[in-house]
Image (cartoon, grey):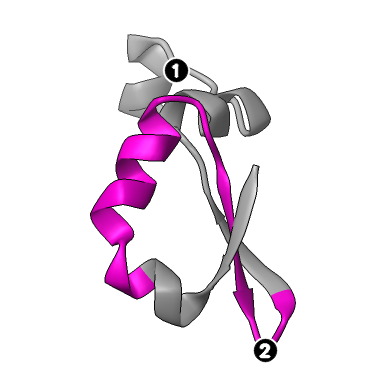
Amino acid sequence: MRTMEVREAKAGFSALIEAAESGEPTIITKHGKPAAAIVSVEDLQKLYPVKRRNFGEFLLT
Protein backbone atom coordinates (compact mmCIF):
# COMPACT_ATOMS: atom_id res chain seq x y z
CA MET A 1 0.00 0.00 0.00
CA ARG A 2 1.50 3.31 -1.00
CA THR A 3 1.01 6.72 0.60
CA MET A 4 1.09 10.14 -1.04
CA GLU A 5 0.14 13.76 -0.46
CA VAL A 6 -3.00 15.27 -1.98
CA ARG A 7 -0.89 17.35 -4.37
CA GLU A 8 0.80 14.23 -5.78
CA ALA A 9 -2.50 12.36 -5.96
CA LYS A 10 -4.10 15.13 -8.02
CA ALA A 11 -1.24 15.03 -10.52
CA GLY A 12 -1.41 11.25 -10.95
CA PHE A 13 -5.06 10.48 -10.32
CA SER A 14 -5.52 8.23 -13.37
CA ALA A 15 -2.57 6.09 -12.29
CA LEU A 16 -4.04 5.78 -8.79
CA ILE A 17 -7.33 4.52 -10.23
CA GLU A 18 -5.48 1.95 -12.34
CA ALA A 19 -3.47 0.84 -9.30
CA ALA A 20 -6.64 0.46 -7.22
CA GLU A 21 -8.25 -1.62 -9.97
CA SER A 22 -5.17 -3.85 -9.88
CA GLY A 23 -5.52 -4.34 -6.13
CA GLU A 24 -3.07 -1.71 -4.88
CA PRO A 25 -4.78 0.78 -2.53
CA THR A 26 -3.32 4.22 -1.89
CA ILE A 27 -3.56 6.31 1.28
CA ILE A 28 -3.88 10.04 0.59
CA THR A 29 -2.43 12.32 3.24
CA LYS A 30 -3.18 15.94 4.02
CA HIS A 31 -0.59 17.85 6.03
CA GLY A 32 1.14 14.54 6.73
CA LYS A 33 -1.92 12.82 8.20
CA PRO A 34 -4.02 10.10 6.52
CA ALA A 35 -7.16 11.70 5.07
CA ALA A 36 -8.56 9.26 2.50
CA ALA A 37 -7.94 6.03 0.66
CA ILE A 38 -8.35 5.02 -2.95
CA VAL A 39 -9.39 1.37 -3.18
CA SER A 40 -11.09 -0.77 -5.80
CA VAL A 41 -14.86 -1.04 -5.78
CA GLU A 42 -14.45 -4.74 -5.02
CA ASP A 43 -12.46 -3.97 -1.87
CA LEU A 44 -14.91 -1.24 -0.87
CA GLN A 45 -17.85 -3.64 -1.18
CA LYS A 46 -16.03 -6.11 1.08
CA LEU A 47 -15.66 -3.40 3.71
CA TYR A 48 -19.19 -2.04 3.30
CA PRO A 49 -21.45 -4.80 1.98
CA VAL A 50 -24.60 -3.58 0.31
CA LYS A 51 -27.74 -5.35 1.43
CA ARG A 52 -29.69 -6.32 -1.66
CA ARG A 53 -33.40 -5.82 -1.24
CA ASN A 54 -35.99 -8.03 -2.80
CA PHE A 55 -38.67 -6.53 -5.02
CA GLY A 56 -41.25 -6.38 -2.22
CA GLU A 57 -38.88 -4.39 0.03
CA PHE A 58 -38.14 -2.08 -2.89
CA LEU A 59 -41.84 -1.35 -3.38
CA LEU A 60 -42.29 -0.54 0.31
CA THR A 61 -39.62 2.17 0.24
Quadrant hosting residue 46: top right
The residue carrying mark 1 is 53
Residue 23 rendering spot, x and y as whole percentages:
50, 26
Residue 31 rendering spot, x and y as whole percentages:
67, 89
Looking at the rendered structure, which numbered label has been put on residue 61? none
Mark 1 residue type: Arg
Q: How crowded is the residue under tag 2: few (<14 C-alpha within 10 Å), some, or many (20+)?
A: few
Q: Is residue 14 above or below residue 49?
A: below
In the image, is residue 25 part of the stretch drawn in magenta? Answer: yes
Residue at 55%, 41% in the rendered image = 25
Task: For marks 2 and 1, give the one nearer the viewer.
Answer: 2
Q: How crowded is the residue under tag 1: few (<14 C-alpha within 10 Å), some, or many (20+)?
A: few
| In-front residue for pair 45/19 | 19
Element carrying mark 2: loop
Residue at 61%, 50% in the rendered image = 2
Task: Locate the C terminus and report the quarter of the image it occupies.
Answer: top left
Quadrant hosting residue 19: top left
| In-front residue for pair 2/41 | 2
Q: CA distance from mark 2 to mark 1?
A: 41 Å
Residue 50 visible in rendering: no
Mark nearer the N terminus (2 vs 1): 2
Residue 38 rendering spot, x and y as whole percentages:
49, 50
| In-front residue for pair 30/51 | 30
Residue at 30%, 49% in the rendered image = 15
Q: Is residue 51 above or below residue 11?
A: above
Quadrant hosting residue 21: top left
The residue carrying mark 2 is 31
Q: Is residue 53 left or right of residue 37?
A: left
Mark 2 residue type: His
Q: Which residues are magenta?
A: 10-33
